[in-house]
Image (cartoon, rainbow, N blue to C red):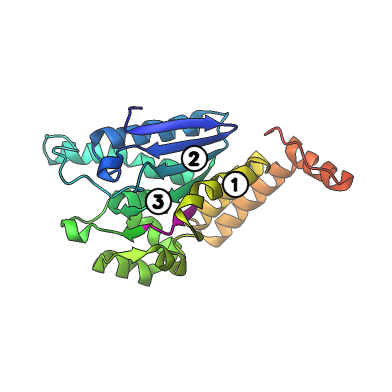
Amino acid sequence: MNDTVLFHLDGGIATITLNRPDKLNAMNAELLQGAVDALEKAADDPAVRVVIFTGAGRGFCAGGDLSARDTLGSGNTESRIGVLQNLQPSSKLLRTMPKVTIAAINGPCAGGGFSWAAAADLRYAAESARFTTAYLNAGLSGDFGGTWTLPRIVGSARARELYLLSEKFTASDAERFGFVSKVLPDAELMDHARSVAGRLLNAAPIALQRIKQNLNDAEDLAFNDALDREAERHVRTGESADSAEARRAFLEKRPPDFKGH
C-alpha cells in the first residue's frame, strides 16, 4: 500500500480509505495500486471480518483523474489493457472476498468510483453524495465492472439509462433506484457503517461467507445449479461448531459466542 490508500483494522473491522482528498480521491496509478493492495490484505487477513470502503475528505471517488498522465502506463494498447486488467481485481475483491464489504459513500461517486461502490455488498450514502457513471462524458466505455454489477442492482432499464445518458443523480435518487440502502446525514455516515459492521461481527462468520457465496452464485448460475450449491453449503454450514453454538445459545437464551469454525 501507499499513502493514497489508508488501511485501519479495529476489532475485526478493516476500514479502507481512499486518500487523495484534494482530488476528491480521483484514481491515479498510485491510488489504483493501493486499492488492490489494501483489498488483498483485507481478503487474506483472518483477523478481518468486515470491510468498510470509503473516501477521505469531501468525496468518495470522483473516478479517473483526467489530469494524471499515463495512469495505465505509456506502452502500446495491449500493454495498457494488461495494466487495467491487473487493477480491476479491486472490484472482484469487493464482490467476492469472503468478508462482507460496505461502501460508505461520501460526496462525489463517479466513473470507476461508482463501479467500486457497485461491487460492494452493502452501500450507504451521505446526503452530500452525488453520483454519475461519468464514462460517456469522458468519451470512455466503462471499467471496473460497473456495466456488469449495476443492472443486477437497479435493473437493466435503469442501468442503461444511467450509463447511456450519464446524468448526475442525488443520494435520494440513489436510494429510490435501490442503489444504496440508506441515506444518512453526512456526520452520521461512518457511525452507521460501523454500526452495521458491528452487527455483522456478531454473526456467524462461516454462515456470512456462504450466504455471500449463494447470493453471488444466484447472479451467475442456472436455478438448478444454484439449488445444488445452496444445499451443499447449507448442510456443511449446519455441521460447523458455530451452528451448534447458535442452537445452544437460542435454547439457553443467551448471545452466541462464535469462533469461525
Q: Secondary structure at mark 1?
A: helix
Q: Amino acid at mark 2?
A: Met
User: Residue 254 placed where, x, y %?
Assistant: 83, 43
Q: At x 68% / y 41%, what residue is drawn?
A: 204
- The label number, if any, that marks residue 195 in the structure image: 1
- Label annotation for residue 233: none
Which corner quadrant of the image does residue 108 belong to? bottom left
Q: Which mark is residue 106?
A: 3
- Residue 190 is left or right of residue 12, and the answer is left
Q: Residues within 10 Å of mark 1 (few under 14, many from 20)?
A: few
- Quarter of the figure with residue 88: top left
Label 2 crowd bin: few (<14), some (14–19), many (20+), radius 10 Å: some
Precedes in sequence: disc 3 or disc 2: 2
Q: Which mark is residue 97?
A: 2
Q: Is residue 114 visible?
A: yes
Residue stretch rendered in magenta on the structure: 118-129
In the image, residue 104 sits, relative to residue 156, either above or below, namely above
Q: Name the amino acid, label 1.
A: Ser
Discs 3/2, front: 3
Front one among 230 and 38: 38
| Membership of 185 in magenta stretch | no
Residue type at the position of mark 3: Asn
Can you give x and y, in whole percent of width and height, for residue 9 in the image? 52, 30
Answer above or below: position of 189 versus 30: below
CA separation in Å, label 1 and label 2: 21 Å
Q: Choose between 107 and 261: the one closer to the eye.
A: 107
For the image, the number of numbered tags is 3
